[in-house]
Amino acid sequence: MPDTTLAALGGSLPAPKLLHPLGLWVLMAVLAVANGVFRELALIPRAGEYGGHVLSTAMLVAAILLVSFAYFTTTAVAYTRLELLAVGVAWTVLTVGFEFLVGYLEGAPVAETLGQYDVLAGQVWILVPLALLTAPLLFGDVLSG
């Protein structure tokens, strides 16, 4: 059986501890893109720009929590609290980085992308990175108490 640890590469974490959460992030990114398409095609025409934004954000947060719950409460991989925090930080950094990259590629000013995080202006998008950050700790700790 091949060595599934990263020890051969100088690391000490088993590959599933890194690869499974990365795969989950890819799944959540696909769900986020599908959510954005649904927002543009179905929610905004029915609920308006702001209503569509709020509903879409709530749906994406629910999807993130559902995917996280399904994985962390059924996986055989044991994570420490520090590893769960690292997963949440990685998911958040990947998501925010992806968001700024897409904005850059679309020619959107950085101020426009930053504006999505302006809670005082009624933006609720900040709930998405907060869900990504906290979901591993929330659900990864369910089994460990």
Image (spheres, rainbow, N blue to C red):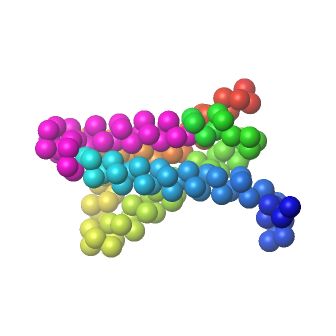
Residue at 43%, 63% (x, y): give it. Answer: 98
**Relative to 62, is 132 on the left or the right?**
right
- For residue 72, say whether it is visible: yes
Camera-nearest residue between 48 and 67: 67
x then y, percent, for residue 22: 59, 56
Residue segment shown in magenta: 40-68
Where is 4 relative to 133, above or below? below
x then y, percent, for residue 96: 44, 58
Given the current orientation, which residue lies at the most extreme front position? 1
**Relative to 51, is 3 on the left or the right?**
right
**Relative to 61, is 81 on the left or the right?**
right
Q: Quadrant of the N terminus?
A: bottom right
Q: Does the magenta segment cover residue 47?
A: yes
Residue at 51%, 45% (x, y): give it. Answer: 132
Where is 71 relative to 113, above or below? above
Camera-nearest residue between 53 and 26: 26
Where is 81 relative to 6, above or below? above
How many marks on residues?
Answer: 0
Residue at 39%, 42% (x, y): give it. Answer: 60
Report the predominant secondary structure element of the magenta stretch: helix
Given the current orientation, which residue lies at the most extreme top position? 145
Where is 94 relative to 54, above or below? below
- For residue 80, say whether it is visible: no
Q: Does the magenta segment cover residue 28?
A: no
Q: Quadrant of residue 76?
A: top right
x then y, percent, for residue 113: 32, 60
x then y, percent, for residue 55: 28, 37
Residue at 47%, 42% (x, y): give it. Answer: 64
Q: Quadrant of residue 81?
A: top right
Q: Quadrant of the C terminus?
A: top right
